[in-house]
Image (tube, helix red, strand yellow):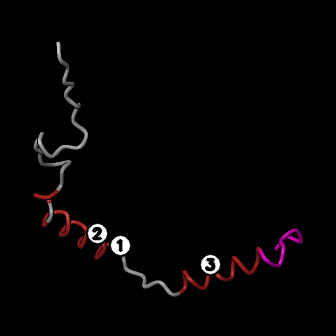
Amino acid sequence: MSGSWSVSAMKEVVQQLGLEAGFNCVKVSPAAAYLKQFCLQNVQHDPLLTRVSSSTNPFRPQKVCSFL
């Protein structure tokens, strides 16, 4: 380690490593299979794959009402 590291910086690194050591690791293949299954089960609720009705779309252009 470099001599320029402060004690507080080293404490933060140790704390972060302690948090990361507590994570449950999952192999990539089962995680990818679960993610694929989740996506296929929820495809009907995905607005990027299904159309959003114009009445419920919050990003639709607003209509301007003007009186002549």
Q: Is residue 63 above or below residue 50?
A: above
Q: CA distance from mark 2 to mark 3?
A: 26 Å
Q: Residue at x 20, y 48 (%)?
A: 48
Q: Please identify, in this view, whether the residue under mark 2 or under mark 3 is nearer the observer.
A: 3
Quadrant holding the C terminus: top left
Secondary structure beneath dot 1 equals: helix
Where is residue 50 drawn, in percent x and y?
12, 48
Mark 2 lies on a secondary structure that is helix
Amino acid at circle 1: Val
- The residue singled out by tag 1 in the image is 28
Residue at 28% x, 69% y: name it: 32
Which residue corresponds to mark 3?
16
Q: Residue furthest front?
A: 68
- In the rendered structure, find residue 4 and report the number of the disc placed on it: none
Question: Quadrant location of residue 10?
Answer: bottom right
Residues drawn in magenta: 1-8
Tell me which label, 1 or 3, sits earlier in the chain: 3
Which residue shows up at 15% across the image and 46% down it? 56
Residue 36 or 49: which is nearer the viewer? 49
Rendering quarter of residue 39: bottom left
Structural crowding at the residue carrying mark 3, measured as other residues with C-alpha within 10 Å and reported as few (<14), some (14–19) or many (≥20): few
Q: Residues within 10 Å of mark 1 (few under 14, many from 20)?
A: few
Mark 3 lies on a secondary structure that is helix
Residue displayed at 62% across by 78% down: 16
Q: Amino acid at mark 3?
A: Gln
Q: Are marks 2 and 1 in contact (CB under 8 Å)?
A: yes
Residue with the mark numbered 2: 32
